[in-house]
Image: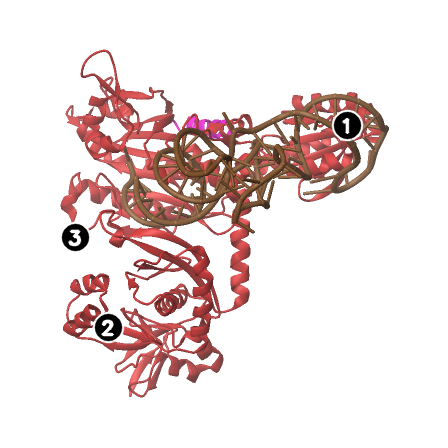
RNA sequence: GCCGAUGUAGCUCAGCUGGCCAGAGCAGCUGAUUUGUAAUCAGCUGGUCGGGGGUUCGAAUCCCUCCAUCGGCUCCA
């Protein structure tokens, strides 16, 4: 008999050789029907793999991310089986589960897979799933594993096996498909009730562009077909919210081939929106003791040689700008920090000056690869809401706190209620690859963790994710559809102060090296606006909305009164306009709704007589009649709610 | 940059097994209408069918090439 410990701490006895599925059956049939995999002493196992020793176990169902992972990993195998049956002779790379589904990288040889083939594969997958195929786990000697795939002619698997140690190699067989795999897998394929192969893409073997490009097939599966339907609806909704589509419809920004790809053109409404965001942050930063600076769009090549950016990124950037002077070269600035370092060193500093916080909405240019460009989220010219804080190592903690406060203010004002904080630390086993003293790293990492703790951020700690120059804290928001976006960042930097030989005079009258903190709460204005558009589906918070209200006169007779209303609203700092077309009220309302203008003010005979407006709220409908004062108050209250 | 797909009016799309002057809806313009909570009616304008080259008596349609966009890959100071 063996002792099995459950997550709640209870311990029960079972016969050796029992598996997680049997255990689940003992608890309830319903649970057993839903078990996809289990964890045994923290390791994920097949639910059907026998347990021979005492263990603590957890059972995973579709509701656990581990359960989903098992489901999708098995789905990748199922897809591979279907593809192998349909197109004999194909070779397989890797086929893992991912955040939303799974993929498999396949060398399809002569056959070129197209979208049209996906339907065939889906059909075959469902047929195979219904066969209730089990996944048989076999431990295989390395030599046997090699001969199996050598015979099959699959050089990709051979390469993978080559890197594994004898004794830790397992195969899984389901139906006609056998794969090198560490598992775990579903009890059987009948859990897979709905399949959608979502896309097709090229992917380099092992992510190395010098190696062969395989065909990557992406898919997702569900245990209920209803879940697939919901997923497809979510995809539809995401498409409707796509900032590229809304950006065009709401006239926020555009691109022109003549200007160049990846170079956004902000239209008046988008520019006003962006300016409002910038003004908001400027005000917050002023209160927080930031000093504005302005630096040019280009810099001498020597600046970037000093900063180290030239060596690392020079060749991937825009080509240098030359001048009539032979040998003189300038670069479009890819970063603001080197310029800010020069501002710092423009005069000597005392420890009493610190911290110094230089802020700039700095536009930078980076030559992103053409295939990488994407709407406003990946562009070649963008504006960072950048600032650099020069401080002593002891001030890091306070400064982080200050920045977090700003970021929280922004999230609140823009209705990002869910976010994830990640702290990236250095790899404790590989300390040599980082610049800066051990002591400073420890101090900074401790400070960041303490701040996260004190601010109740519930941050995720990731070792080895820090940049070589310092630890950092990143903020990822979840938008209204649950998608994650990386936005704000706070990074400690020991490197640039060193390279620029920055220093301040301490109380001991000696030179000391300041620490630099890079921070950008929005990240970049372009990316942030893109995320904001998708988060709120184009229905911006009232304080940001390019137009807050539109006045809709019932007929020409009321245009005069409409003008009076507009005057009043403008005087009350409310952004409004009049729809004076000779259209019916229904038409004007429809158009205003489509433009997502927050408030529609219908004015006709009655309103003119009593000096009022009939208020209709976007997406909600008629709110009734308001006096002008009441309406202005309504707006003021709604704006202040978020500030 | 690489793989795959797509590119027809400002937008959404039809035409594309080669052959009547390349179409529709919306938007825009003009006129009529003076309107009460999601589309008033009529007329008009607008496209060298992404660019270039080729095949053909004839190309939006077939081929080549370049560009851009989309989905991924790689990268992201």
Point out which mark residue A386 bears: none
Given the image, what chain letter belongs to the residue carrying mark 3? A
Callout 2 secondary element: strand
| Mark closest to the chain's N terminus, 3 or 1 | 3
Residue A548, horizontal then vertical, whole percent: 63, 31
Q: Nearer the viewer, mark 2 or mark 3?
A: 2
Residue at 74%, 36% (x, y): give it. Answer: A587
Residue A432, horizontal then vertical, whole percent: 13, 45
Location of mark 2 (residue):
A170
Location of mark 1 (residue):
A582
Callout 1 secondary element: loop
Is residue A609 visible from the viewing direction of this image?
no
Residue A376, horizontal then vertical, whole percent: 44, 36
Horizontally, residue A584 falls left or right of residue A227, namely: right
Residue at 23%, 32% (x, y): give it. Answer: A315
Which residues are drawn in magenta? Answer: A275-289
Category of crowding for the residue at label 3, using alpha-carbon neighbours closer than 10 angstroms: few (below 14), some (14–19), many (at least 20): few
CA–CA distance between discs 2 and 3?
Answer: 29 Å
Q: Which chain is brown?
A: B
Q: Quadrant of residue A39?
A: bottom left
Q: Quadrant of residue A561?
A: top right
CA–CA distance between discs 1 and 2?
Answer: 75 Å
| B45 or A277, nearer to the observer | B45
Residue at 43%, 32% (x, y): give it. Answer: A525
Quadrant, the N terminus of chain A: bottom left
Q: Which chain is red?
A: A
Location of mark 3 (residue):
A429
Q: Nearer the viewer, mark 3 or mark 1?
A: 1
């Amino acid at each position: 008999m063996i002792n099995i410990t459950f997550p709640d701490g209870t311990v029960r006895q079972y016969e050796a050789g029992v598996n997680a599925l049997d255990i689940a059956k003992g608890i309830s049939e319903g649970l057993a029907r839903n078990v996809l995999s289990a964890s045994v002493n923290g390791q994920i196992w097949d639910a059907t793999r026998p347990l021979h020793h005492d263990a603590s176990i957890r059972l995973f169902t579709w509701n656990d991310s581990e359960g989903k992972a098992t489901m999708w990993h098995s789905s990748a195998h199922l897809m591979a089986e279907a593809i192998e049956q349909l197109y004999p002779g194909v070779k397989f790379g890797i086929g893992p589960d991912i955040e939303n589904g799974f993929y498999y990288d396949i060398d399809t040889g002569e056959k070129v897979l197209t979208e049209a083939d996906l339907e065939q594969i889906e059909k075959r997958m469902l047929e195979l799933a219904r066969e209730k195929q089990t996944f048989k786990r076999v431990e295989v000697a390395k030599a046997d594993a090699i001969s199996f795939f050598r015979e099959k002619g699959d050089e990709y698997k051979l390469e993978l096996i080559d890197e594994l140690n004898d004794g830790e190699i397992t195969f899984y067989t389901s139906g006609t498909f056998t794969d090198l795999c560490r598992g775990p897998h579903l009890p059987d394929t009948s859990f897979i009730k709905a399949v959608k192969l979502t896309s097709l893409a090229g992917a380099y073997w092992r992510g190395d562009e010098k190696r062969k490009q395989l065909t990557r097939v992406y898919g997702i599966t569900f245990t209920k077909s209803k879940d697939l339907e919901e997923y497809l609806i979510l995809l539809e909704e995401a498409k409707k919210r796509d900032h590229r589509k809304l950006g065009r419809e709401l006239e926020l920004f555009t691109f022109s081939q003549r200007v160049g790809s990846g170079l956004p053109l902000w239209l008046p409404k988008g520019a006003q929106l962006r300016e409002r965001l910038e003004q908001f942050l400027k005000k917050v930063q002023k209160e927080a003791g930031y000093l504005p600076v302005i630096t040019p769009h280009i810099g001498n090549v020597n600046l970037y040689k000093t900063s180290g950016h030239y060596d690392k990124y020079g060749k991937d950037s825009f080509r240098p700008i030359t001048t009539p002077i032979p040998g003189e070269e300038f670069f479009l600035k890819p970063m603001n920090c080197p310029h800010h370092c020069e501002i710092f060193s423009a005069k000597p500093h005392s420890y009493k000056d610190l911290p110094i916080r230089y802020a700039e909405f700095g536009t930078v240019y980076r030559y992103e690869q053409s295939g990488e460009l994407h709407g406003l989220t990946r562009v070649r010219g963008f504006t960072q809401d950048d600032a650099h804080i020069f401080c002593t190592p002891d001030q890091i903690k306070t400064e982080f706190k200050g920045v977090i406060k700003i970021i929280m203010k922004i999230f609140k004002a823009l209705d990002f209620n869910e976010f994830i904080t990640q702290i990236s630390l250095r790899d404790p086993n590989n300390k040599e690859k980082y610049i800066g003293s051990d002591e400073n790293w420890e101090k900074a990492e401790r400070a960041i963790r303490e701040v996260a703790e004190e601010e109740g951020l519930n941050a995720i700690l990731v070792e080895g994710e820090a940049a070589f120059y310092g630890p950092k804290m990143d903020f990822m928001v979840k938008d209204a559809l649950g998608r994650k976006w990386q936005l704000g960042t706070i990074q400690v930097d020991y490197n640039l102060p060193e390279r620029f030989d920055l220093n301040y005079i301490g109380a001991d009258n000696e030179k000391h090296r300041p620490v630099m903190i890079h921070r950008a709460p929005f990240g970049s204005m372009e990316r942030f606006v893109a995320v904001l558009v998708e988060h709120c589906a184009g229905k911006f918070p009232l304080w940001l909305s390019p137009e807050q209200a539109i006045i809709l006169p019932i007929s020409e007779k009321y245009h005069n009164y409409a003008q009076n209303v507009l005057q009043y609203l403008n005087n009350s700092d409310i952004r409004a306009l009049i729809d004076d077309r000779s259209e019916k009220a229904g038409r004007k309302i429809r158009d205003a709704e489509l433009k997502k203008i927050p408030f529609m003010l219908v004015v006709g005979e009655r309103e003119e007589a009593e000096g009022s407006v009939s208020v209709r709220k976007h997406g909600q409908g008629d709110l009734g009649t308001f006096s002008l004062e009441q309406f202005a108050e309504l707006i003021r209250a709604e704006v202040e709610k978020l500030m």
